[in-house]
Image (spheres, rainbow, N blue to C red):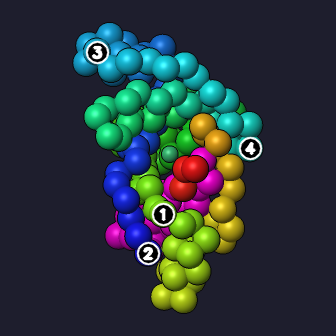
Amino acid sequence: MEILKIDHLGIAVNSMQSGRAFWSDVLGLAFEGEETVAEQKVKTAFFPVGESEVELLESTSADGPVARFIEKKGTGFQHVAFRVANLDEALAELKAKNIQLIDEKPRLGAGGARIAFLHPKATGGILVELCERS
Ligand code: ZN
């Protein structure tokens, strides 16, 4: 597969407001608005950092994946997202290598990206997202 760059780092926060207090007010990263991804039960905000971005994730529901992550591991670094040239090809390659996936098929993420998550069991404990943007 062709990995183009680190697209973003996902960071789980209890609230967007407290997250922004550090990432935006202290570090001075530009806040470019929030987006709710209903399917993932999450509110996201992206902060550009050079060629990559920081993504803050606030759960909108107590049973959402981000809420469950915070319950188990606390707030903080949650996933790394690699931008790939072709997500369908990348997933086919991973399946051929018997890599455990959370998403067998691409789904729609924030900002209209096509995304898929790899299972942390297959990556040494890190939640890895692949994303393709047109
Ligand atoms: Zn992400």
Q: Earlier in the sequence, mark 2 or mark 3?
A: 2
* Of the pair 70 and 27, the residue shown nearer to us: 27
**Mark 4 or mark 2: whose residue is earlier in sequence:** 2
Decide: is 85 above or below 63.
below
Q: Amino acid at mark 2?
A: Met
- Helix, strand or loop status at disc 3: loop
Horizontal side, residue 96 vs residue 125: left or right: right
User: Based on the displayed image, in which of its 4 quarters is residue 25 positioned?
Assistant: top left
In this view, the mark in front (2 or 3): 2
**In the drawing, what numbered circle is on residue 85?**
1
Residue shown at 54%/55% (left/top)? Answer: 132
Q: Which mark is residue 1?
A: 2
Which comes before the other along the chain, label 2 or label 1? 2
Query: Would residue 38 be counted in the magenta stretch?
Result: no
Judged by depth in the image, the label closer to the viewer, 1 or 4, is 1
Count neighbours of disc 2 (C-alpha within 10 A) and say few if under 14, some if 14 to 19, many if 20 or more: some
CA gap between label 2 and label 3 equals 34 Å
CA separation, marks 1 and 4? 24 Å
Q: Residue furthest left?
A: 27
Nearer-N-terminus badge (3/1): 3
Could one spot residue 101 in this view of the protein? Answer: no
Badge 2 vs badge 1, beta-carbon distance below 8 Å: yes
| Mark 4 in CB contact with mark 2 (< 8 angstroms) | no
Name which of mark 3 and mark 4 comes first in the sequence.
Answer: 3
Of residues 131 and 63, the one drawn nearer to the viewer in this rendering? 131
* Residue numbers of the magenta segment: 113-131
